[in-house]
Amino acid sequence: MQAPIDALTSGQVALLGVPLDENSSLFRGPALAPKRIREALHSGSMNWCAESGLDLEGHAGWRDVGDLSLGHGSAAIDAIDAAVTSILARGARALALGGDHSVTYPIVRAYGRKYERLSLLHFDAHPDLYDDFEGNPFSHASPFARIMEGGSATRLVQVGIRTLNGHQKAQAERFGVEVVQMAEWVSGRRFRFDGPVYVTFDIDALDPACAPGVSHHEPGGLTMRDALGVLQSLEGEIVGADIVEYNPLRDVVDMTAAVAAKLTKELLAGMLR
Ligand code: MN
Ligand code: MN
């Protein structure tokens, strides 16, 4: 059941569908993700308990506010910012279901106006730090360049990275990004944040063996258990999150829909703990 944003109460988490994939450089498809993630959540294939035991079925702490209706270009970016701003104005928090990774820029821009010191925990195969990618400032290859330029976040920690090139390495140094590359990954790694933290989860951080439904297959990624371990042990207050880059058109027997649905439950539980 869906509720409007203006029915949210303080402290609630709003599940917000953001069906935008026009800033994806290779394939379209992630705009279909919010609907498919909801279908997986409601399919009866899994129950509504997070691994902590928290039962999210009918839980008063969250509401599904449905999908945004979006135009194109900067109008779409501004509409996402406006919707998240209205969620935050009610004292609620957003868990966004993307969409390609371009949606994180306007979401975090809205968060940055509310939180003076905001940390980002960013799961991704890619640093997404391109200053310019094919002339599109909103490209899904650039959201963290836009966010750090704009000063919306004070700390950016990237996990799962395995495509760092010279330009992106220079960008990471320019913005003081803490990049944890897969080549140096150690199972059981834990992260601690002082103050509010926003979690942005690009599904391609995971190994394509467990999450094939993404636009850019990058072998050698995190296991789902690695990712769950990081989320479940995270020290810090999760004030918002997104799950992006799930591409149903590239999926295999809905494997990645199940992954995204489970991440939705675990992030909800993390935000409600
Ligand atoms: Mn990304
Ligand atoms: Mn990626």
Image (cartoon, rainbow, N blue to C red):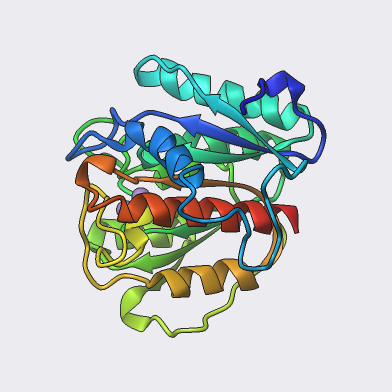
Q: Residue 3's image quarter?
A: top right
Q: Residue 98's image quarter?
A: top left
Q: Where residue 245 appears, x then y in whole percent?
A: 34, 45
Residue extending farthest front:
44
Task: In the rendered view, tell whether residue 102 sits above or below residue 165.
Answer: above
Q: Where residue 56 appears, x then y in whole percent?
A: 67, 50
Q: Residue at x 40, y 54 (%)?
A: 258
Q: Residue at x 67, y 23 (%)?
A: 5
Query: Of 126 and 154, which appears nearest the observer?
Result: 126
Residue extending farthest right:
10
Q: In the rendered view, does 218 fall on the left or right side of 107?
A: left
Query: Total number of numbered labels?
Result: 0
- Quadrant location of the N terminus? top right
Q: From this viewpoint, is residue 119 visible?
A: no
Q: In the rendered view, does 124 fall on the left or right side of 18?
A: left
Q: From this viewpoint, is residue 134 visible?
A: yes
Q: Where residue 143 appears, x then y in whole percent?
A: 40, 42
Q: Residue at x 57, y 55 (%)?
A: 47
Q: In the rendered view, does 97 fall on the left or right side of 130?
A: right
- Quadrant location of the C terminus? bottom right
Task: In the rendered view, tell whether residue 199 sits above or below residue 60.
Answer: below
Q: Where residue 152 appears, x then y in whole percent?
A: 58, 42
